[in-house]
Amino acid sequence: MPMTMTADTIKPLTYLFADDGSIPNNPRLPALIYRGVIDVKGIAEPEVVFENTFTHNGWGDMWRNGVYRYPHYHSMIHEVMGIARGRVSVRFGGRQGEEFDFDAGDVVILPAGTGHQGLWASPELMVIGAYPPVGRFDLCRGSKAEHAKAVGAIPEVPRPATDPIYGKSGPLMTLWRA
């Protein structure tokens, strides 16, 4: 079952990261960070709450894992990551990017091209990741050949039809409009 929605929508923090020559990032769409958007306190299987919420809002191809310890990005698809358990420190934007700490209940939505790298994780960390139904998964590590190809591919990635947390009327729909 998806999370229970309240009358108040949590407004995400927004961040744009510059192309660093290795990681292209996304020049137009900001990364969105929802702090404490899903209440996991006392939930025996918080992973299922995230998975059901993402599924209910049209995002799929889910995985359960952590965040890779090397810088990487996806040039042909957007990604959502929800912290179901534990804590993690992630750098976004490439080697010169910005570091963020996340706790259980936080969600980050990464537009295609946004570099991310796990720096530290608590032993119990469990991240739930998902993708919108449009786009194609790829894993890029920042080579020059990948970068050149990605710069052309990123603007062509279709915007998702829904926010993975709030659906068709979520903040992503306004923040990522054309």
Image (cartoon, rainbow, N blue to C red):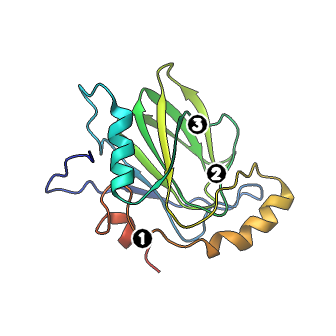
Q: Is residue 92 left or right of residue 149?
A: left
Q: CA distance from mark 2 to mark 3?
A: 11 Å
Question: In the figure, 85 relative to 117: above or below?
Answer: above
For badge 3, the amino acid type reads Val
Query: Residue 37 sits in which quadrant?
Result: top left
Q: Is residue 174 left or right of residue 61?
A: left
Q: Secondary structure at mark 3?
A: loop
Q: Earlier in the sequence, mark 3 or mark 1?
A: 3
Circle number at residue 161: 1
Percent coordinates x, y for residue 48 in the rendering: 36, 37
Q: CA distance from mark 3 to mark 1?
A: 25 Å
Point 23% across, 57% down: residue: 9
Name the quadrant of the N terminus.
top left
- Nearer to the camera, 128 or 107: 128
Percent coordinates x, y for residue 43 in the rendering: 26, 28
Instruction: Determine which residue is flagged by label 3.
Output: 67
For badge 1, the amino acid type reads Ala
Instruction: Determine which residue is flagged by label 2.
Output: 115
